[in-house]
Image (cartoon, grey):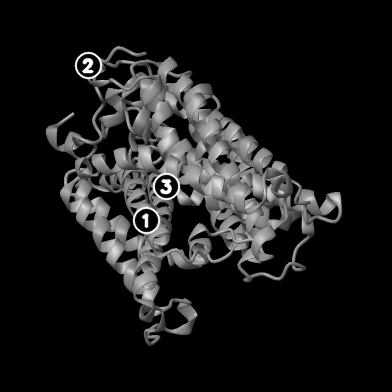
Amino acid sequence: MSDHQQSLLTSNDLAPVGQENRHWNTWNYAALWISMSLCIPTYMLASSLIDGGMNWWQAILTIFLGNSIVLIPMILNGHAGAKYGIPFPVLVRSSFGILGANIPAMLRAIVACGWFGIQTWIGGYSLFLLIKTWMPGIAALPEIFPSVLSLSTGPALTFFIFWLINMYVVYLGVDSIKKLLVFKAFFLPLAALALLFWAIQAGNGLGPILSQPSKFITSADFWAFFFPALTGMVGYWATLSLNIPDFTRYAVSQKAQIAGQTLGLPPSMTLFAFIGVVVTSTTIIIYGESIWDPLVLAEKFSNKILVSVAMVSVAVSTLATNIAANIVSPANDFAHLSPSRISFRTGGYITGIIGILILPWKLIADPGGYIFKWLIAYSSLLGPIGGIMIADYYFIRKMTLDLHGLYDTNGPYAYRNGINVPAVIAFAVGVLPNIPGFLVQVGLLDATALPAWINNLYHYAWFVGFIIAFIVYILLMKGQKAAPNTSEYEPQ
């Protein structure tokens, strides 16, 4: 393999991590998930279930089940990262091909851009509320955006300011965010507990809060909401279940990534979600309506100092989460397009621009849009990729990869012109059943145009896509010989 060929497929960010540089232990992974879970969208995730009609234990159970389910592909896909020290874009070369890997990499990157936009909107809106507390006039600025955008001038201005702050951090580099992550790790749990204590006190104890009944009249109504909601819960971390090798490549052992993720993900998500459930249930008691957005709730507090401290906390913690969770991975994915030309900084700028174009304020405008249009929609794309990755690594390759071949334009993963056609076909077949239901959800197709069962497949989008792509890929790849392991790195 020539140096030119190698430069097309590798860079410092994409090269395997040697054993001597793998230092992440069990508690590093547990801490990672605790930090990732403690964010405003997690709170809103739980709150949206209450707003959708569930009572407290139904919402908590749904979230726990969803995170327990997504933990399985998280650990399975993390195995290759820990064994070979490779990131997600390189791992999917074995299934999609050295060039075809750009398909899952770009789909995963676009989703990260959406999350970047959502987090940036949340951070920007916290700045808007902070300024509004002391300068109410910002809420009365003349409207300058077309009504179709549903974007007021004040929030738009602070959104852009917060976006610029994010881009400045990208310019400085990821190391600049370390202190903010430490601040978040200590302060946000305290702020969350303070909000929980407020809710318990304002709601006259947990009794009245937890006695709030479900809004569903019949069991059929409940199940009609439960399965899409469960799919949304799985979809919430569907992105990380694919690119988890970006993190497990630094693991000291397989045991570290497995135990760390198991200890960190379901418990922390469930605990923080419980706070969101309790607080949202309290708003029903106090205000007569469920307020699922904590920033909207903060507007109802009269103490200016309290609101200011809360909004600064949200802004800083959101900034830290945004860079760590929504910049690092898509930067790797965009770099995969052209390793020698696209740097981390450039990938971060691309993420930022797409994050605006995706109109994040519309994605979280209401619980229905958040679950049915955003979480489920992208899970329908990522589920098939997860199915193909697991089928390839465990059933086709038997957990054995040719490490050098992953970086060789003429190696075993070059396939036909760099693309593994069976993977592309399996992906397309996995996505196809979910398209009619998505078109119905966004209003582009009448619900009566097709049989109801076809439309309803969308409610199980991640599961449908995962299972179908998994089976189709194995059938199409049947008889193909797995590449031998010729790695110079010692497998875990």
Q: Residues within 10 Å of mark 1 (few under 14, many from 20)?
A: few
What number is the disc on residue 150? none
Image quarter (top left, top right, bottom left or bottom right) of the C terminus = top left
Q: How far is the residue under mark 3 from the one under mark 1?
A: 35 Å
Considering every residue shown, the one lying at the far right of the view is: 218
- Looking at the picture, how far across and down is residue 314, in whole percent? 39, 54
Considering every residue shown, the one lying at the far bottom of the view is: 142
Q: Earlier along the polypeptide chain: callout 2 or callout 1?
A: 2
| Residue type, numbered disc 3 | Arg
Disc number lying in front (2 or 1): 1
**Residue at point 24%, 41% (across, down):** 179
- Residue 408 location, quadrant: top left
Please state which of residues 126 and 434 is positioned toward the viewer in this rendering.
126
Residue 288 visible? The answer is: yes
Q: Tell me whether circle 3 and circle 2 mark residues in contact (CB < 8 Å).
A: no
What number is the disc on residue 108? 3
Q: Does dot 3 land on a helix, a strand or a loop?
A: helix
